[in-house]
Image (cartoon, grey):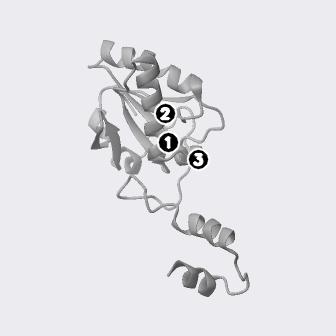
Amino acid sequence: SFNRLVTQSFPYLKPALCLKVFVGVILFSNLHAQTTLVPKDIEPLRIGDTIPEVLWNMKFTANSHGDSKTFQLKDYQGKLLLLDFWATWCASCINGFPKMEELQKAYVNELKIILVNAQQSNDSYARVQKVLEHYRSTYGYEIGLDYLLADSILQQYFPHKILPHLIWIDKDR
């Protein structure tokens, strides 16, 4: 059981329930990773860097119109990629979705926009659904863009502290 694992792994702690939960979150935080291959040492990219092969070929699972969709960045080779980092608590992020969707529709052959909800935002699937349902019922807006939830990879390649955070990947990667 989890209690035994924590007690065996950290015998000197005599952990209380809250400490066990905290350690559990730390130990098992990557169980829901959206990729099949996770590099051990990710070096953050800087402006002008080329997307590394491992990231270019990595498989991601996005929410797409209520369904699950697996893709690789290389699937959009030849297009301008826009990664839009967001969180449910970032009103300006969500308020920007309709404009992003307009851009996606206007430049469907030249542009691919992917919304990225990073693990550091602490959003859950239930929280995202609640916020998107609020926007649907209040404003009549239903998200049509693909989005990643609880991303733990792209946030390491493209670290940021402020949202929204946009990453442009040109046709040459």
Say which quarter of the image contains residue 102: top left
Looking at the rendered structure, the secondary structure element under dot 1 is helix
Amino acid type at image mark 1:
Arg
Kindly tell me whether residue 50 is visible in this rendering.
Answer: no
Q: Position of residue 171 (x, y in %)?
A: 36, 27
Amino acid type at image mark 2:
Val
Q: What is the C-alpha distance between the residues marked 1 and 3?
A: 14 Å
Amino acid type at image mark 3:
Gln
Residue placed under numbered mark 1 in the picture: 127
Label drawn at residue 146: none
Looking at the rendered structure, the secondary structure element under dot 2 is helix
CB contact under 8 Å: marks 3 and 2: no
Looking at the rendered structure, the secondary structure element under dot 3 is helix
Kindly tell me whether residue 1 is visible in this rendering.
Answer: yes
CB contact under 8 Å: marks 1 and 2: yes
Residue placed under numbered mark 2 in the picture: 131
Residue 20 vs residue 47, the one in the foreground: 20
Say which quarter of the image contains residue 139: top left
Residue placed under numbered mark 3 in the picture: 120
Indicate which disc, 1 or 3, sits on the residue closer to the N terminus. Answer: 3
Q: Quadrant of the C terminus?
A: top left
Q: At 43% across and 38% down in the image, what residue appears?
A: 129
